[in-house]
Image (cartoon, rainbow, N blue to C red):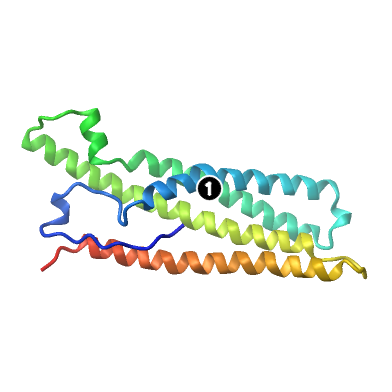
Amino acid sequence: MAQKSRSRRNNGDPKQRWNDPAPFGLTPARQSMASGAGALLAGFSTAIVGVIAQAPDKIRYPGWALLLLAWAAIFFVACVQCGFNARALMYSHAEITEWRPLEWTKTERKSLLEEQHSNAEQGRRWEQGAEWTYHIGIVLLGAGMTFVLIPMGNSSENLPRWIAAYSAIGCSVVQFVVFARGWLEDRKGMNEYASPET
């Protein structure tokens, strides 16, 4: 769920500034993705698996469909777990001051600053894990739906089913490519933010 990067390069050592998301809005978007969309799609994938398992004779490739959809559900659950771990580590300066009001000594400020930077570094790895597992889950879901939609035998309904099958896998692949490009742009934005102007 990448968004357009916004460079926020400032003078000074980045380690002396309070950590904040780069670009703005990306961390809340990832949290929403993991807690909302990821959980919803995990349930959806699991429900389809249950339907196919009860009527495998209605689908041309039930084994492949079950495998891909099961993997999709696993990746979506992993997305939710990564998001949970990320949220525990991604907190703002405003939250710190709310939990531990000013005034701080220099030692306390330095300790809190270092701890926030360290936690944010770990939190961003969990956030990236949530993003990648979510989008891989999307591709697997599209691939599983494709195997469900492939027609059996000769029928006047084969053409729309083939169109639906190609649409499912095509849209999921396009979505993943768009995500990968956006992710690379976000990485560039974060690197620019981390590097002070000269």
Q: Tell me: residue 67, above or below residue 78.
A: below
Q: Position of residue 86 (x, y in %)?
A: 39, 44
Compared across the picture, whether 63 is left or right of 167 comes to: right
Q: Tell me: residue 94, above or below residue 48.
A: above
Residue at horizontal 32%, vertical 53%? 24
Compared across the picture, whether 153 is left or right of 22 comes to: right
Compared across the picture, whether 190 is left or right of 111 comes to: right
Q: Where does the C terminus fall, quadrant-wise?
A: bottom left
Q: Position of residue 43 (x, y in %)?
A: 64, 43
Number of other residues with Cα within 10 Å of mark 1, as a class: few under 14, some 14 to 19, many 20 or more: many
Residue at horizontal 89%, vertical 55%? 57
Q: Tell me: residue 132, above or below residue 93.
A: below
Q: Where is residue 182 in the image (x, y as percent from the top left)?
A: 42, 65
Instruction: Classify residue 59 by image quadrant.
Output: bottom right
Q: Helix, strand, or loop for circle 1? A: helix
Specify the farthest residue to the left: 106
Q: Where is residue 68 in the image (x, y as percent from the top left)?
A: 68, 58
Per the image, the residue denoted by label 1 is 78
Q: Which amino acid does label 1 sit on?
A: Ala
Residue at horizontal 68%, vertical 54%? 69
Counting every numbered tag in the picture gives 1
Instruction: Classify residue 14 by image quadrant.
Output: bottom left
Q: Tell me: residue 191, above or below residue 66.
A: below
